[in-house]
Every structure is written in C-alpha cells, then in structure tokens.
Image (cartoon, coloured by chain):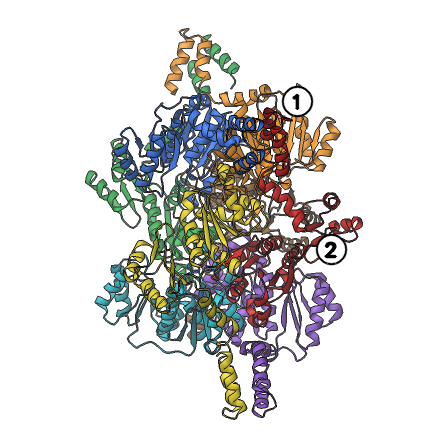
Chain colours: A yellow, B red, C cyan, D purple, E brown, F green, G blue, H orange
Amino acid sequence: MTPAQLAALLHDVAEGRVAPETAVDRLRHFPFEELPFARVDHHRVLRQGHPEVVFCEGKTAEQVVAIAQSLVAAGGGFLGTRANEAVATALRVQFPGMQWNPLGRTVYLPPETGTVRKTGTILVVTAGTSDLSVAEEAAVTAEAFGHGVVRLPDVGVAGLHRLLSANDRLQEADVVIVVAGMEGALPSVVGGLVRVPVIAVPTSVGYGASFGGLAALLAMLNSCAAGVTVVNIDNGFGAAAAASRILAG
Amino acid sequence: MTPAQLAALLHDVAEGRVAPETAVDRLRHFPFEELPFARVDHHRVLRQGHPEVVFCEGKTAEQVVAIAQSLVAAGGGFLGTRANEAVATALRVQFPGMQWNPLGRTVYLPPETGTVRKTGTILVVTAGTSDLSVAEEAAVTAEAFGHGVVRLPDVGVAGLHRLLSANDRLQEADVVIVVAGMEGALPSVVGGLVRVPVIAVPTSVGYGASFGGLAALLAMLNSCAAGVTVVNIDNGFGAAAAASRILAG
Amino acid sequence: MTPAQLAALLHDVAEGRVAPETAVDRLRHFPFEELPFARVDHHRVLRQGHPEVVFCEGKTAEQVVAIAQSLVAAGGGFLGTRANEAVATALRVQFPGMQWNPLGRTVYLPPETGTVRKTGTILVVTAGTSDLSVAEEAAVTAEAFGHGVVRLPDVGVAGLHRLLSANDRLQEADVVIVVAGMEGALPSVVGGLVRVPVIAVPTSVGYGASFGGLAALLAMLNSCAAGVTVVNIDNGFGAAAAASRILAG
Amino acid sequence: MTPAQLAALLHDVAEGRVAPETAVDRLRHFPFEELPFARVDHHRVLRQGHPEVVFCEGKTAEQVVAIAQSLVAAGGGFLGTRANEAVATALRVQFPGMQWNPLGRTVYLPPETGTVRKTGTILVVTAGTSDLSVAEEAAVTAEAFGHGVVRLPDVGVAGLHRLLSANDRLQEADVVIVVAGMEGALPSVVGGLVRVPVIAVPTSVGYGASFGGLAALLAMLNSCAAGVTVVNIDNGFGAAAAASRILAG
Amino acid sequence: MTPAQLAALLHDVAEGRVAPETAVDRLRHFPFEELPFARVDHHRVLRQGHPEVVFCEGKTAEQVVAIAQSLVAAGGGFLGTRANEAVATALRVQFPGMQWNPLGRTVYLPPETGTVRKTGTILVVTAGTSDLSVAEEAAVTAEAFGHGVVRLPDVGVAGLHRLLSANDRLQEADVVIVVAGMEGALPSVVGGLVRVPVIAVPTSVGYGASFGGLAALLAMLNSCAAGVTVVNIDNGFGAAAAASRILAG
Amino acid sequence: MTPAQLAALLHDVAEGRVAPETAVDRLRHFPFEELPFARVDHHRVLRQGHPEVVFCEGKTAEQVVAIAQSLVAAGGGFLGTRANEAVATALRVQFPGMQWNPLGRTVYLPPETGTVRKTGTILVVTAGTSDLSVAEEAAVTAEAFGHGVVRLPDVGVAGLHRLLSANDRLQEADVVIVVAGMEGALPSVVGGLVRVPVIAVPTSVGYGASFGGLAALLAMLNSCAAGVTVVNIDNGFGAAAAASRILAG
Amino acid sequence: MTPAQLAALLHDVAEGRVAPETAVDRLRHFPFEELPFARVDHHRVLRQGHPEVVFCEGKTAEQVVAIAQSLVAAGGGFLGTRANEAVATALRVQFPGMQWNPLGRTVYLPPETGTVRKTGTILVVTAGTSDLSVAEEAAVTAEAFGHGVVRLPDVGVAGLHRLLSANDRLQEADVVIVVAGMEGALPSVVGGLVRVPVIAVPTSVGYGASFGGLAALLAMLNSCAAGVTVVNIDNGFGAAAAASRILAG
Amino acid sequence: MTPAQLAALLHDVAEGRVAPETAVDRLRHFPFEELPFARVDHHRVLRQGHPEVVFCEGKTAEQVVAIAQSLVAAGGGFLGTRANEAVATALRVQFPGMQWNPLGRTVYLPPETGTVRKTGTILVVTAGTSDLSVAEEAAVTAEAFGHGVVRLPDVGVAGLHRLLSANDRLQEADVVIVVAGMEGALPSVVGGLVRVPVIAVPTSVGYGASFGGLAALLAMLNSCAAGVTVVNIDNGFGAAAAASRILAG
C-alpha cells in the first residue's frame, strides 16, 4: 500500500464511502506492504541502475536462464556470480550480449538503459595469481554497479617493492579491496599506506594449515592497521557490494 | 626528508655546494624517511586533529601516563581504550580535563586545538545491554575522530519492533556500526534496511556455545545482506576507525 | 514377554504346571523382552500409523527396496530420506504408489490404512531458496507423520518485509520449523514474533566461513529469543520428528 | 497504538474531526507501535503472569536491584538467573519475599497476583550431581512460568538401572528436559524411552576434552533418538522457556 | 529384588499365598531392581575391596567429608581425586588414617578389610616432570584398586636413552600407562617396545599451540603403534580404571 | 655400561676371568642392535601366527599384490585393511584362498600353518547398521589374530531393550569393542554393564555436526563410565590390535 | 635505479645538464626501483643458479608450459612442484631434458649453466611410506637448489631400532628435514639425537582424528626437543627452501 | 650384531685372536648406554658453555633454587625462563650474580668459565611493544647460548617505513627471529627482504579472534615467503634454540 493508496483510503473514510471499521481491518492486515524500507528497496534497484545479482552455484543452467529471462524482461539487466561454463554458454545462446568472464566466473548483461555511472574509483589489489579469480569477481561486480575499477595484481608482501612501486595507484583510489590467501598479510600493509577504506577479502588459496582460508581470515580480522574491515572467504562480490555502499551510500 | 629538503639538497648540488657523491650518500641512507606514505602518515595526524590512540590493556598506569605526557606535550591530544579505573585515575591526576568513560573503558583528552569537526553521522546500533561497552568504545572513538554519533541501543532481533520503530534514525545515518553478541543477527537485518555502509562488530557477549564471540563473528561474516563488513570481536575502536576512513577518506 | 504371557506363566506356577525355580530361570533371562518401553515402542508405530523412516544415504537401491518390502509387507508404510534418483526409481518399480520428492530427496508410501491424521499445523519457514531441500525433507516427514503443513519460503532477514507480511501464517501455526543457512538469524526473528515452539534447523548452505553450517548452528544455539531449540545441521527429518513429539506427545 | 486507538482515529476521520492527511501522517510515523506482535508481546506477559527474566551475570547488585524495583513496581514479579550471593543478598534486603536458590543461582519474586498455574508437568532429568546447578535453573524457571516440575537427578547412563527404575516418572511427563555434561548421552537414552518432547541441555561439566561442554553439545545434536532438540551449553533457562512454549503455546 | 526374593515370591505363588495377578503387579513395577548388572555392580565393590572414587573438584570440603563418612560407615574405604589441600585437611581431621598425596591430588583411606591385593603390575611411564601430577593420580588409583605399581618418570622422547635404558621395567609390566603432554609422542615409542596393553594419557602440560592438551590427545589417537588406546586429557584416574579392568576383568 | 666397564669386561674375558658365555649374557641385556624388541618383534610374528597387516588405502592393486607375495613367500600370511574391490580381485587371482570381506573391506590369507588360536572372546558391539563396516574390520582383524569373536550389531542407545536383552553376551565377553557414530553414547552404557575392558571406536557415521566423527570421539573420551579407552575414528583395526594386546599380552 | 645511475643523475645536476626540479621528479617517482632488496632479489637468482619455482596445482598444462618457456628463455631453469602427469607430459614435449619425478610430483630442468653446487648435506628423514611424496618434494627441491641430499625413509617411532641403526647418517647431516604424518613424533626423537637444525614437515597422512595433518602439525609445534622448527602441512618445498637458507645464507 | 656374533667376538678375545681394545672399538659403535648422542649431549653442554635451561612456570621458588644449586655446583651455569618475581628474588638471595630480566621473565647465571662466545649475529625483530616479552626471552636465551644479538623492536607492517629504514640491520644478520602477534604478517615481509634463515614466533598478543595466538600461528605457517619456519606460540626460547642450532650446528 503506497502513501497515495493510504490517502485514498482515508479520503474514502472521510467521505463515508468506507466505514472506519473496514479501514481498520484493511490497515491491520497489510501494515508491511507499505513499510518505507520495502518501497525504498524496490526503488533503489530502479534508481541505481544496477542489475539483480544471482549466485549461480548449485543452480542448473536452465534455472539461471529462466531467472535471467525474468529479470531482463523487467529491463533490469543481469549479473551472475559463480557461473561455470555450462551456465555461461546457455545464457549466451539466449542473450548474445551477455559478457562471460571465465576468470571471475561472472556473467553480465547491462540493463537496457546501460550501466549507470557513479563517482569513485575502486582499486582491487591482489596478493598472488591464485587469488585472481576472487579479485575478478569483485572487479566485475564493481563495474556492473557503476564504479570505476583499477586492478593491481600480484603484489604479495614477500616482494614488497612490487606494492611500493604502485604507490600512485594506492593513493588515488577511493576505496581499496585487498584480496589475499595464504597468510593474509596484504591488507595490513595496504591499510598502513592509505587513508581510504580498506576491505579485506580472504581467499581459500593455500594448502596445509590454511584450512580453506581460515588462516587468512583470522589474520585479516586481527590486522594491526586500524579500520580494516573483512568480508567472508572468497566473497569478492560482497567486497564490491560493500565498496558500492561506501561510494553510493 | 621532505620534498622541500630534497629540492634544497639538489639545488646545493646544482650550485656546487654539495658534491654529487655526498648527495648520493645522503640519499642512499634515508630513502625511507621521505617516502610519501611516511610523510602522509605524519601529516595526517596533524591535519585531522585526532589524537593518537593507545591500547591501555596490559600497560601499567605509569606507562600510560608517560605516553600521554609525551603525546600531550606534542599538542596531539590523547585517546586511550581498554582503560581500567586505575589508569583513568592516574591520568586525571595529571590531566584534569581527561574524560573518563567507564562504560566504554575509554579516556580522552582533546588536542589543544580542540577536536576537528568533520562531516557525517555514525549511528551505533546495539543488540543488547551487555554489548553496550563495546558500542561505547566505538562511539567515543568516533567522536574523538570528529564525527557526529547517534546511539541506538537495545534493539535486538528478538523484539523486532524496537528496531523498526527507529527507522528514521537508520535512514539518516551516513555509516552504521552494528554491535551484537550471541547470534550476531542484527547486522543482517540492519543491512537489509539501509543503503549506507554497515560495519558489524561481534562481541564476546554470550555463554555456552558463543565461544567467546565466535558464533557472532561467523554469523556476521556469513550475512545474507550484501555488503556488510566485519571487524574483530569486541573491536569497537576498529569499527569507528573504519567508519572514519569512510567519512574522512 | 507380554503381560499376558507373564500372567500365563504365573498361573502355570500357581497351578503347579511350572516349578517356581523354572519360572525364576525364565524370568531371569528375559527381563527385558517385557519392558514397558519395548512394548510401547512397538505399539506406538501401529497406533500412530506413521511408517518406519529409513535413512537411504549410503545404502544401495537393492538394500532400500529390501527394507521397503519388509516394512510394506507388515502393513506399515515406508518413508525414506536422503534418497537419490536411483533409489527412487528402483522403489517405484516395486511400489507404483511410492511418492518421490526430488527436492526433499524423500520417498513415501503411506501405510495400507492411510496416513493417520492428527491435530496441529506445522509451519516450515525457509530463509533462502538454497535451504529448500532441507525444508522439504521436514515438510514431507511432517505430512507422513500425519500433521498439517504450511510452507513459507524465502523470507530471509535481509528483506524483513517478506517475513512480516506473512504474519498471519506465523500466528496460526502450532509449531514453527525455521530452516536457514548462512548466518542463521531467522529463528531468532521468528522466535520473537510467535509464542509457539520454534525448532531451528541450520543448513550447510553458505560458503567460506560458514564451515559447512557451523556458523548457522552456533548462531541458532545462541539465539537471543528465549526458548528456541535446535537440531543437527541439515536435519529436516529431526525437526519434523521433534514437532511431531510436540503435537502428538 | 492499539486497535481501539486506531478505530478512534478513523472515527475522527469519518466524522471530520481529523483530516485524512493528518491521519496519514500519524499512521506513517507510528506503524510499528501497533504491530500485532508488539501488542501480543506485551499482553502475553500480563496474561501468562510470569515475570520478566533478568540475566544477572555481569551486572552489579545495584543494577539488579534497580531493575527489580522497576519490574515489581509494575506488578510483574521478578526472576533473575545467574545470580550470585551478593546479588541475592541485596535483593532480599529490598524484597523480603525474594526466593534465593543458591544451587540454581536464581532469585524469584512471584508477581502480586501470584504465579499463574498452567497445565503440564516438566520432568527435569540430570545425569550427574555436577549438572544439578543447570538443572535447578531450568526447574526454577519452569515453576516461575507456572508449570509443574518433577526432578529426577543422578541417572547417568553408566548406571542404567537408576534411570530405568524411574520409568514411571518418565512416562508421566509432558515434556522432558535432560541435563547432562561429559559425553551427553542421556538425552538419546531418554529420547528412546518416551514419546513426548525431549529438550537436551549440554553442560560445561567435564574436564580435558569436554572443551567447555562442546563434547556434550555435539553428542546431543547427533542424537540417534529422533526428535530430540538442543539448547545452548548450560542454558537451563532456555530449556525451560522452550518447554513453556510447548505447554503454553 | 534379589534372586532369593524372587524365588520366595514364586514359592508364595506356587503355594497360593500370593495370587498370580498380584505377582504380575509386583514384577511389573520392579523389574530393574533385580537386574543382574545392578546387583553385580554392587557386589563388585564388595568383592574387589576397592573403595568408591569421588571426584572432589567443585565440591566443598564439607561435602567431601560427608560423602567420606557415608562410605566409610559402610566399610568401603574412600578414594578422592582432584582434592586440594583444604579438602585433604578436613578429611584428615575426621579420618587420621587418610593418606594425602599432594602431587597426585588424591586422598585415600583403605577399606576396613584392607586393600584387596590382585595380580598384575602396572608401569606408569611419564614424559616430563610436569606430567607427574597426572601420573601420580593414576598410580595412587591403581594401588588403591589393589594392583602393583612401578613408576618410570621423565623419559621423554627427546632424550631417548633414558627410556631405552629402562627396557627391563618396560618388559616386565603387565599394563603400561603412558602419561605425556606437549607433543604426546611417548606412547607411540613405548607401544613399539612392548607387547602388553598401552594406555595413553594426554596431559594439558604445554603452552602455546598445545591448546590445553589437544595436541597430545590428537597425537596419541593417531599413534602409529598398533593397539594403543587413549583416555581423556589429564585423566590419570581413568587410565588406572582401564588398567584395572584389564587385570581384574 | 661405560666404555671403561666394557673394556674391563673384555680384559676379563681375554684373561680368562670371565667366560665368553657369561659376557654374552651381560651384554645381551644392553646392546640395542639386538634389542629384545627388535628380535621379539620378529619372533612374535612367528610365534603368534598372525600375519602382517597392510593398510591398502592409497596403494595400487599391483603394490598390494607385490607386498602380499613377499609376505606369503615368507610363510607369514596376509591381512589387508581398507581394501577396495580392485585390490581384492587382483589378490584373489594370485591367491585363490584369499578371503575378501567387502563389508569390512578386508582381505585375509591365513599363514601356511593356519591361524594360531588363542584364548579369549572379543565381543564387537555396534550401534547402527552404518557402523558395521568399521565393526567388521575389527572383527576380521581379531579373528586373524587368533581370537574368538562374537558380533552384537544394531543395539544403539535409543532402543535400549535391544542391548539389555543381549546381557548374556555382554557378560561372557573377555573384551568388548564398542563401535558407534553419531553421539557415541554406546560405550558409556556398555561400560556401566560390564567389568571387562571396553575399547570404544568412534565412527565417521553421522551428518551435520558430527564433523566426521569428532562428536562421537569427544563423547567417548568424556565417557562417564570409568575405564573406557578410545582409539582413532573408524579405526576398527586398532581396536582389535588393542584387544589382542590384552588377551595375548 | 642503481647507485651508479643515481651518481650519474646527480653529476648531471651538478653539471647543469639536468635541472634540480627534474631530478626531484625522477627521484620522487622511482624510489623503490632502486631499493637494495629489489636488486638483491634479482641478483640472487642469477648468482645462486637455482631456478624459479612454480606451484603447478590449479594451473593448466598450457599455463605451466608458457611459464617454463619464459623462464628457460631467460636461462634460469625451471622447477615445478605439485605437477600431475598431464603437466609433466606437456613439459617434456617442449623440454626433453625435463626431469619428471612422479612420487614427488616435481618437474625439473636445470639452468643452462647447470645446477650450482653448494656446500652442505640435507638428510630427509621420513616416518612412513605414505609420507614419501612430501619427502621427495623436499629432496628434489633441495637438489635443484644445489645441495647434497641423503634420504632415510621409513623410520617411524613405533620401530625405533630402524632409526637408531641409522645413527651415522643422522650425525653426518648438516640439516635434517623430518617428514611425518599421523602423530608427528619423529622430529622430537630426531631433535634429541642431533645438534644440527631440524625442520619438521607435518603431512596430511593419517585418518580419523588426524584432521588433515592437524594432529602432526600440533605435535611438531609442541616438540619437547628444543629448537625444532616447523613448516606448513605437506610443504616439502618450504622445508627445502628453509634448509637452503641455512646452508646458503 | 647377533648374539652369535657377539659370542664369537668374545671367544676371539678370550683366545687372544682379538685384542680387548679392538673389541671395545667394535662394541663402541653399537651399544646405546654409551650412544654418541648421550655422550655428546653431555659433552655439548660442557663444550658449548651454555647452561641448562629450566622452564620455571609451575615450579615453586624452592624447586627452582634447588635445581639451580645442583646445576651451579656442577659448574654449568643456569638459565631459567618464565620466571616470575618470586622465583627471581629467591634465586638472587642464593646467587647474587643471577641476572633477572623482568621483561623477558628470565633469570641467568653464566657458567663459571663465562659464556662461550660463538660466531654469528641473531637479529630479533618485534612487531609491537606487546610482543617484547617473548622477543626478550629469545634475546636473552640467544645471548646465554653465546650468540651476538641485535634487537629491532616495533616495526609492525602497518607502518612499513619503520622496517624498511632498518634495512642495514636486516642485511647484516646471520639469522632473523621475527616475533609477532595479531595477524602475524611480519615474518612474510622480512622473509622477502633477507636471504638468511627466518624463524617466526607467533605470540598470544591480540584480542577477539586472535584466539590466543592461533591467528598469528596460522598466518606464519602459510607465509608466502619461501623457507620461513615457525615455532610454538610465545616460544621465544625455542626460536633462540633453533637459531643456535643453525649457528653452532
């Protein structure tokens, strides 16, 4: 129930077309349809121009195609994460413009009106080449959400000069997403070099006692650089969503 | 070595006052003093006007007082976290203006020039009364860093109407810090209600299988609300620092 | 040994057909066959009319069919959980009336006398679409045990209005089973909305630091909503069995 | 806003005393005060006659007394859990009728109108004498909530005859709460003996690899007795609350 | 009900003094009092001559004294584990013959009839001096249970010659209890040197990543020496009880 | 024995004061090339008549056949654990008498001289049908080591009468191996019913929070039945080896 | 920028060929290219003559071949770890001299100038045959780095004489790498026998409660032999790299 | 050597064919009472001049004094770790020359002959001031073992310039011990800057999800810098012992 509908109902009451008791009943049963946050939720999608995001893992190609058709029919575009080749192939049959990023395992179709550009540059820093898949998920998501993205790969802390020589890019970013597996030390170092928000993404890259990314996750949570925040293991999408909250919030 | 000092040195070389070999030696031995990030680090403190932050736990009152004297002598103000009553008492003997917040366990003395005010309002949301100490640490830190702070306590998810009736405050915040122990569900709910950045702080509040805050930590890392980020258990200071990076970055 | 058999034995003793010492021996060696709980156990199955439940995972199709034949021959019906397609196909060859639910991975054949209807409605609430398989296992089990079932899917806490708009269904349930993965927050919210028993089922849905459902499990055990109880990860069957104890107990 | 207030407002609109636009504004800003669950929440306390429950651990005696005064002034009675002797003593100075149970660490003052009696008997079964504190917390809570309580202590599974000889009490209960530490086996055995709901409470009793109750918790979650549910470690209060949902729901 | 009582009852039936129905009732209600294992349990204590064992931790001195008085009054002796000095002092006031072993934290009063000697020698091997307390608990328990005990302390694997030079004692034992903290390697080495049963006791001795004995526990469970069994961390009593089952079983 | 002592002894031999045979005896007890355990180790195999045991998992069929040929050529028989069908088939081509137990995943060829029979009966108790594979590994190993074996399957604690009605078998065993997954409660119950050694084997059977057998392992380590010992998860072989140490030690 | 280049630049400034401001700019933007450690890093590879090391797991054969071509073209040789057969085959098509070690899963092509021999012998000790793969990775890496390697396999602590009889080899080593799974006890024993550095490598060999090598890892970290250090689970390469730091450092 | 061979040798001695001294030599290489490691172990202490090391935690002051008296009487000096003030005071009463280091919690008395100086410099690098206690334990131990020690405190990775500006000290060290808590990133950075051995010491410094040093431990085990090795949490002594093996081995 929109405010307009509410106003109409109350006018009906005022003018005797609807009895007060009837209005009480209607208001009692639908108090939540008209909650501000529900409307806002809906409007935000339209206003921001970024597509719905679908987690493709565990869904069949048919299911993903069906969801995409529904979203595209509504003009909203489509961003899929954790999409394997079968899903990507099936989507591209239906949507030739669908962009398939095999490294980041993403599929992306901009909304009809095009991606709405927004201010701000997100720097996606990666420790090792094995972390690139998660970093690419973050980068593609950030671009689909309308933000500028700069990639800074392979600057792990065991070869510090690689990071330090990219100081310009670090200083120019509005938000930095740092993706690292193994010992997860890179966000602490980056956090000491920049003043802007740093979002750390632990990855499951590593072997032995990395325990599926637990080592990197704990390291990042315990960062000695004040104000570094952390998202779930391998959650490149989540980091980009957090960065977008900062830039578009 | 500042850029100005470097320029002066090179002018001396150009004008023959310093031999090239001597300049090589001076540059070789101090390459790091003049790193952009080092200078920036130093300048940021002065420019932002917020004081150094000292983690008081595990330090004697004498040690904390000595650090405070050094910082205050430099005009930089003082913010101490995890300060017990002994520390606070000792500090107030020396610094009558020191503000002692027993709930948040903080001690704060603004810099001589006063706290530099900055734009932005941080909403600190708390699930239960037992989480208030951590929330207060975040709030005091945020205020010392120059940000506006609004507190929204005791809105745990088991009584949802308390949170929903504060929707105005949620919508007006620039950043939301959500502090919760036990099952750590509140950041997910808040993340679904607002578009701005949400920083989740798990607390060690709980018993039994909360395992010192692990339950809340894992819940927050697995939040179904996209773009929620997490800091360490009980790390109210870290959340405020992250919020400050967002607002001042 | 039934009470009747015991009475007969004692009459034999009374009438001299059996010596007391012989009776002592017989009673000494079979004290447990006649335990009340053993009899009750057997009687309960017949009286309640719900079939034996077989956990099919790790059993071959042949083994499951053999068990089903034995149970059906006894007139008791058959409910199998964690049944894959091979098992289902083999069963339907033998039992054309066998109902195969691929989402819930269940196979069900009502007893000859039909499912005994019992009072009470169980509401099965699900946080996300990925949790539906576990929820369906709960729903099918509850139906096979004779209870009314209402499904309320996809009402995760990040979009609270979806849950709140279904308040009627929440208020009308006699027991609520809440199935959720990721941060496992939904049972706390539901627990605050209803007065009836809430049984929480954590699922292994999630990635990264969900650690196979551990995050959701810990969250549910630490629920701030008083009186929420928890079953094992992915244990939809167990939740339904618990609900049935409540309604039929 | 109660339904009556809402009706009054709408009558005012119908009769022209309040303009529709004014009503829209009032309804927009207070949608949550009148939520069904909020009212219900409030009414339930009055209707059921059981007092508010306060977790005293981590609160000073002064704080607990203040809370108690507020609650008692409202006529609602008072139940405190995890209360140490200092808290109990302070309360009894103010409220001579306050009942202090040092074993269960509870303090209880019935509401002015007395405890409202409800149907149903809760059997609280305990494995060992060290588990008695948690069991007593459950028992006192259940009694304060108006339920009949029977205690069956010290029936651990290593001496099975103790449990079996109490079969009558097991069969007569409406809900069974089973409290056990160490290997946590007792709920499985009890679950096989009774048909009614079984709520398992792991305790932190044990040493070495009990890991603060983790061993018992995991055992109970993995119970081979279908339909046993579990609450948090040492959470006797939670078990009683769950039992009360079953009996009063 | 003893076999004699049962025989008497049945004779009463045979001779018409008790009606069969009455006997059914009496047998129905007391099936467990006469269970073989219950009687055996009771008889074993008397027959083996070893006292009841009381875990003193968490009990007051008064409580322990009361238990001891009850047991001693029954002539059964008393063995207390985890007894601190306060408990020991209180006991010795009442029972001057009570033996207090501060290293093993045990208190022991032999039964009136003296400790019943049994065959077999238990060798208690200890890795380091810090493990001695747990080893002593095992040794005192074994002696109280009537077994011969030989102690072999401080033969950790980092100085292998110490163990090898005690080969005679290893070869002469009937059961070997191996107590070790830190890396818990000693049982594997001992298990390779002897053919008799080896019972491994991990201790919580160690620091850092010993995690309260977890490291030693896992090592012992993974022993490459076939047939080594393990008890709980620090459970010297349990190891002695297991050894006693072997020697007296 | 120091070098000096050794030199003195040899001078005594050289000068006829000590006979060579006497010197052999004195030296026999100290040198380790000829250590009793090395010799004994070798002799034990011959004397006890049980074959070498080979862990087949991770070995190719060719590798296992080669090992078997070597052992059989030496007349020692062959016992393989964790053998899949490919291994079994390859072995039976070479050794038609090889006994393949698909449930226990064992292959067994008695030594030429036949299995040496030894005293003692091992009872292998199993909680559920899913634990049978581990139980069978224990049973086959025990038989190959020359011990009598009685199997008691499917007596989980949720249906206690099944176990209690087998009390005779429990009382007649010399050692009891108890195999259980899920909550691992069975060893505690059995430990309270028998006086002989009880060896608990946790299995990885279970789902959700069984965490690969961790739940059962912890439960067994925390058994409230004194003197129960534990082997590694799924280690049926180890339990049989421990039982054999007891019976043959 | 080398010191020579820096000197040249400064001479240009001194002689007016470069303006001071231009020099400031050049120095400001390239401070890190000339860091001592960056140059050293590069030089070390050439000077030590050992090839780059590539972790092949998770890379396609094509990717590995491309990296190898790049490295070999630069004359630097190639060492690949965790290489499966497909990778090895593809490499050997391009580089017939590539050495494929299927046990250690390594591929190795010496640099054009041959492996640079260095002083020192590394003894690689292995507990069981299942640990050989990790040990071989260490051995091949050590050889490729130019060190002498001696292998001592299958000397697990349950058969101590095997290790003790190899005492000569232990005493002659300059560094000992000890590879062990299961209970991880071998490094403690070896650490007590030698004075030289001991590097412990836990392996994921084991089952049940080895938890993927965690048991061995914790045991090694808690070694009672002073001065034993540990690398990650299964990290044979890392152990060899550590040994090489010691011998070549 | 078999008994027969031994008998033959002794007969040869008895009959003059082999001189006793020759026999001593042949026997010297096998018996273990006189094993090289035992003798060596003893000789090493004398030769290296470093004292026995005593872990004082959990020992009374009296016990430590007694041990010290025994060691000092033998002329061997004394090094105690984890010594509190009571222990230190008691020792200094007896040994006025005992050096008490309250930060490192060490007590040290050089042997009568003075500390034997050895080659090599150990650099002890510390991340934060809270790690200094562990670092000091390492430094004092290294000095007592005769090595040169340089301290480099407070160079955590969040302020990288502090570490980089100390590059000279890094390059001059023979072994680097890196002590860090929180995220444990420093060893990875140092490992990339130096070629010499790097020994990482995780500390229990940190809060929340550092879990007593687990976060730092896992990070260090997963270091992306090849060849970094790790010792137990807070084990400064162990790191120094490992460094001493490298320098003195």
Where, quadrant-wise, is the C terminus of chain C in this rendering? bottom left
How far apart in space, not on screen, are marks 2 and 1 (Cα)?
A: 51 Å
- For mark 1, does the 10 Å Cα neighbourhood hold few (<14), some (14 to 19), or many (20 or more) residues? many
Disc 1, SS:
loop
Q: Nearer the viewer, residue D118 or G118?
A: G118
Instruction: Look at the image and tell me in which quarter the N terminus of chain C lies.
Output: bottom left
> Given the image, on which type of amino acid does mark 2 rest?
Trp
Name the residue at 56% across, 88% down.
D10
Q: Which residue is drawn at 52% across and 44% down?
A: A168
Amino acid at the residue labelled 1: Pro
Seen in the picture, residue F50 relative to A244 is either above or below; the reply is: above
What residue did someone put label 1 on? H111
Secondary structure category for the residue under label 2: strand
Residue H208, horizontal then vertical, whole percent: 58, 51
Q: In this view, does G108 lie to the left or right of E158?
A: left
Residue D243 position within the rendered picture, expressed as x and y whole percent measured from the top left: 53, 70
Q: Is residue C112 above or below residue D54?
A: below
**Mark 2 Cα-neighbour bin, 10 Å: few <14, some 14–19, many ≥20:** many
Residue B175 visible in the shown view: yes
Which chain letter matches label 2? B
Taking depth in this image into account, of F85 and B59 the one nearest to the observer is B59
Q: Which residue lies furthest to the front in this view?
A: G16
Q: In this view, does A75 lie above or below E41?
A: below
Label drawn at residue B100: 2
Q: How many labels does the image show?
A: 2
Q: What is the chain letter for disc 1?
A: H
Report the residue at 38% width, 62% height from top.
Answer: A78
Q: Which residue is drawn at 39% across and 75% down?
A: C149
Image quadrant where residue C80 sits: bottom left
Residue at the top extreme? H16
Label 2 with label 1: CB-CB less than 8 Å: no
Residue F155 vs residue F113, the one in the foreground: F155
